[in-house]
Amino acid sequence: MLLASLLAFFLAAFGLTGAAVWFLLRRPAPASPAANGEQTLEEFEEAATNLLRSDRVSSIGPWESMLQRFHFAADWKSVLAEADLSWSVGRLAAMMLLTGTLVTVALWRLPWMPMLATFGCGLLSSLVPYFRVMQKRKARLDQFEQAFPDALDSLARALRAGHPLAVGLDLLASESPAPISTEMRRTLEEWKLGRTWDQALDHLSRRVPTINMKIFVAAVRLQSRSGGKLTEVLGTLSESMRESLALEGEVRAISAHGRMTGAVLTLLPVGIAAMMFYVNPPYLYTLTAHPWGKPMLMGAAGCLVLAHFVIRRILDIRL
């Protein structure tokens, strides 16, 4: 009986987690000539230069074939690459399923936990690994943005001294901190392996999907085609990036009070409930024993979480 119950729990958690991933993260598949059995020149070149690199979604065959049916597998691969993680899409999906299943089974053992809240917590916990990857991706991109103006100044000085672009990128790869050095080294290696500068820079803008990187790539492409003083463009771009970062810092400092207020308002009811439970436990037993007590607690917890995200959304000022 116990084994049957555990099997039912695992199957239910697996299905609900898969449904959450499907409804929250799916995106429409882009039209591609490969759907008609054709292969574009870019796809052929990508396959030719990736002979020694594994682009598989997972090392487990059935798991890989199942994940390839979903449209978000390619998006997850890009997110993992932008976060500079060596994980595969299959590993991330397995961690999400395992986390959701373990939390669901653990909460199911609690007699006072409603079934709907159990499955809801399981679904939310299954998204924790994905949010962790997104957090590492954001931290890496922010670190790149902070160091990018100095890297552009170094590149401009190298070009002003008469060095070609390849030598300037080599200097950035050897002297700049990560992740600037990592991305510049990858771009330089792609160029050395036979890629054109346009292709290597296009891949760089895909790995670092920021506005400043797109402007840099567009400036280098324009200079290679029509000529011009790239050093002046890089100097102006680095100066504007520093001004933008300073403005973002001011906005973040102004909105810090609102973020702190939102955190306090979210944690205050939880702290008061814990204090009351410690001082006078029968006072809260009345709420849990009443038929409407558990739905009210679930509604209050849901409203707290929703209010927290609403406050964060209001304070998320994009320049």
Image (tube, helix red, strand yellow):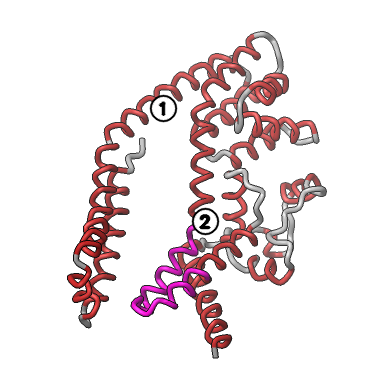
Disc 1 residue type (three-letter): Leu
Q: Residue at x 52, y 33 (%)?
A: 143
Q: Which residues, given as a range, are shown in magenta? A: 102-130
Residue 54 visible in this rendered orientation of the protein: yes
Q: Please provide percent x and percent y for residue 66.
A: 65, 70
Q: Can you tell which of label 2 and label 1 is closer to the viewer? A: 2
Residue 125 in picture, x, y percent from top left: 46, 63
Q: Quadrant of residue 288?
A: bottom left
Q: Earlier in the sequence, mark 2 or mark 1?
A: 2
Which label belongs to residue 130?
2
Of the pair 308 and 32, the residue shown nearer to us: 308
Q: Is residue 301 above or below residue 252?
A: below
The spot of residue 183 in percent (x, y) is: 64, 34
Any part of residue 31 in sight: no
Question: 162 left or right of 5?
Answer: right
Asked if 220 appears above or below 129 in the picture, the reply is above
Give the residue drawn at x 19%, y 76%. Answer: 286
How far apart marks 2 and 1 lie (CA) works out to 27 Å
- Residue 131's disc is none
Quarter occupied by residue 293 = bottom left
- Residues packed near mark 2 inside 10 Å, few (<14), some (14 to 19) or many (20 plus): some
At 54% from the left edge and 50% from the top edge, which residue is drawn?
Answer: 133
Q: Which residue is situated farthest in the top direction here?
A: 161
- Residue matched to label 1: 245
Residue 122 covered by magenta stretch: yes
Image coordinates for residue 253, horizontal then vertical, percent: 31, 31
Is residue 37 found inside the magenta-colored segment of the image? Answer: no
302 above or below 232? below
Q: Is residue 133 left or right of residue 258?
A: right
